[in-house]
Image (tube, grey):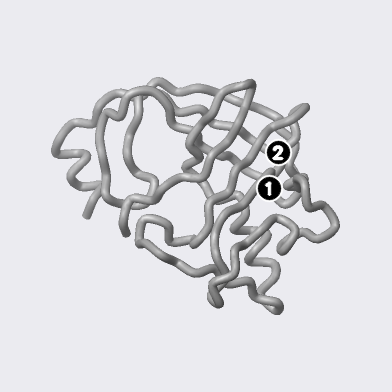
Amino acid sequence: MTAQIPEQLTFQGRQYSLFAEPLRPWLARRRNRSIQFKRRTTANGRGYFGHWEIIDDRLFLVSIRGKFPDGREVALKDLFPETPDRVFADWVTGELCCPHGKMLAYSHAGYSSIFENSLFLCFEQGVLVAQRTVKNEPPVPDEFDRLED
């Protein structure tokens, strides 16, 4: 898999790349009314770019960019007509990873590149319940090469 262009997250006034796809569970639940996105590059397998924000410890999808297969632009109101300005992501439970700092090792596989730090944000039904930062070390060359196999 090609390295993926990450979605963006605003948290505590800072912009982070998001090595996760928080919209994926919501899209998976809608299989009977499938939503398709036009994929224009292998670096964006999901076909859209989301911008997320944590406000008062709650995760919101604040915008989305992409195209439907017929070429129409995707807007938040197309997916969430009841809340076109921002959507509380109550379907998100689990940990999201936000790498930051200098890139220590590039990987051409998904979200596998390694950065100096990783901010892990843990959510329960869209509510931030824990966070931790991990300082990463550059991988041992042989070890990292095996990750790409």
128 in relation to 125, above or below: above
Residue shown at 71% from the left, 41% from the top = 60
Residue shown at 48% from the left, 36% from the top = 17
Residue ranking furthest to the front: 72
CB under 8 Å between callouts 2 and 1? yes
* Crowdedness near tag 2: few (<14), some (14–19) or many (≥20) residues, C-alpha within 10 Å: many
Residue 85's x, y, as percent?
77, 46
15 in relation to 110, above or below: above
Residue 42, disc: none
Element type where label 1 sits in the image: loop
Residue 115's x, y, as percent?
35, 29
Residue 45's x, y, as percent?
43, 61
**Residue under circle 2?**
59
**Residue under circle 1?**
92
Residue shown at 15% from the left, 35% from the top = 141
Residue shown at 20% from the left, 47% from the top = 146
**Image quarter of residue 126:** top right
**Image quarter of residue 44:** bottom left
Residue 88's x, y, as percent?
77, 45
